[in-house]
Amino acid sequence: MLQVSDLHAYYGKSHILQGVSLEVGDNEIVSILGRNGVGRSTTLKAIMGDPAPQGRITFRGKPVAGRSPHEIAHLGIGFVPEERAIFPSLTVEQNLLLGIKRGVENPRWSLEETWKLFPQLKDRANAPGGALSGGEQQMLTICRTLMGNPDLIMIDEPTEGLAPQMVERIGELLQEIAQRGISILLVEQRLVIAMRISHRVYVMGHGQIVFEGTPAELLANEAIRREWLEV
Amino acid sequence: MLEIILVSTLNGVLYGMLLFLMASGLTVIFSMMGVLNLAHASFYMLGAFFGFEISRRLGFWPALIIAPVLVGLIGMAVERYGLRRVHKHGHVAELLFTFGLTFVITEMVEMFWGKLPVDYRVPPSLDFAAFTVFSVNYPAFRLFVLLISVAIFIALLLTIKRTRIGLIVQAALTHPGMVGMLGHNVDRIFMLVFGVGVGLAAIAGVIAGPILITQSNMAALLGPILFVVVVVGGLGSLGGALVASLLIGLVQTFAVAFNVSLADLFGTSQLSAVLEVWLADIWRVTIAQIAPIMPYILLVLVLIFRPRGLMGTRDT
């Protein structure tokens, strides 16, 4: 579905991504693990077109690199940024409605379903997005991207700063998304969730992929874990 | 006294609403695109001159529609073929681009209409006294300008709060990048907002032209005040722009109306004799004389004590 090969990206003069190659298949949950600052978030952002990617990115055979973010969104890639980017002055419902893309028919995910899955969002439908708690904002931002009916959703650190109970709910939500045939490319620092739900994992270090395999293979590979994951 | 207060209030609100017509576009453009459009007042001037020229040929009412549309189209072209290309090179380049644009527009205006004021008059259909308070005749055209400004304010508010494009604009005020990643064509929205923004400034020009003086220096006279409005109101806040516009409109008109100096306030007491020596330089300066710098004093105070502006969402 998504194929990235030899991806490079720069912020100013710093060479952040130095030849990243990865792929995500249909109905697959793939995680990118690694310490802070190794380029995991930048990988997702570069796929979305900002910072401008250099290298080959294709989605269902169509070239992605060189397109603008809104065109990439229309190809079927959804992005949930780490900073959540809730529109603070708009209501919860308006935030969700802005996720709907023009020309999308029969979306897998509707407003009704969001309300059903997260009754606490429905209770606050008319509250400004900025007034939500961290966990509620995380659900809102994921659901907002789902409203655009992506075939692949890229989610950056969804459990960061959340209470353990909320982390569990996010984990359930990710599995619910996958069950509807939406592929997931997840960037996570908490190994527990990522290892439990992912089909495959990549480990990143210094702007490159340093390990690729199943969660079980990563568990077995202590050297990689010690060098690139454990603090 | 009462008549001064009433007339000054009306004039202050009128001037404030005219400022708001211009500042609303400026603040939305700035918060969405990060572009401080130094040429914003120049588009207001273009509106006034187009209004004058079209009024002369077709009459005032067609001018009220055609001039802002023309200016809006010019604005969209400037955004699409100018600003968007300059954008790649950063904010300083954009700033210089709009700075240069002010000179281009001023020179063009002087080429066509010269440096002297043009004879842009109140249309005959609105040239009568709307009402008389005490012995003052209040011109109908001023009332009309007030009504138009209020109507546009309401239309703008409804568009922004109730329509989908308005929601996208609101969202793009805080997170333009995210709006694009949700699949909305941010570039096209920027172009539209720039066009509508300078179009609103042009409406202000068409209706203010007959009251103020339509001359090639009118942009330079008004430009700085606009930035005061945007900073005082707070970046990204239309509500703030409205409050700041009215505040500055009222402060300026009231200041002009009151011919009071420190000397008048303290009368001829012993204290005043002492103070007069200490404050000799400003002792006889009247409030009316310092009216033009009052907005800038307000600007400095706001920047010191409330850098976010009255209702801003982020720091200047």
Image: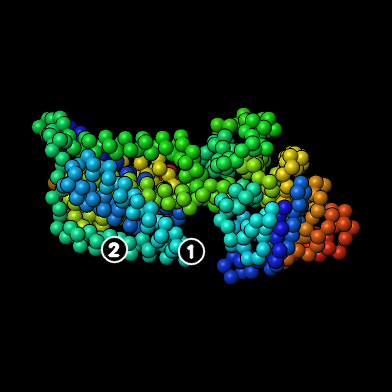
Give how far across and how far down residue A157 sits, in percent.
Answer: 69, 50
Image side of residue B210 versus residue B95, left or right: left
A204 is higher (above) or lower (below) than B211: below
| Mark 1 crowd level (few <14, some 14–19, many ≥20, 10 Å Cα) | few
Give how far across and how far down residue B130 sits, in percent.
Answer: 16, 31
Image side of residue B154 versus residue B34, left or right: left
Give how far across and how far down residue A162 sits, in percent.
Answer: 70, 44
| Residue B136 visible at all | yes
Q: Which mark is residue B104?
A: 2
Query: Mark 2, chain letter?
Result: B
Mark 2 to mark 1 CA distance (whole Å): 22 Å
| Residue B228 visible at all | no
User: Which image quadrant is residue B280 in?
Assistant: bottom left
What secondary structure is found at the residue carrying circle 1? helix
User: Which image quadrant is residue B145 in?
Assistant: top left
Q: Nearer the viewer, residue A8 or B172?
A: A8
Give how far across and how far down residue B125 sits, in percent.
Answer: 15, 35
Amino acid type at mark 1? Lys
Q: Which residue is mark 1?
A: B88
Query: Mark 1, chain letter?
Result: B
Amino acid type at mark 2? Val
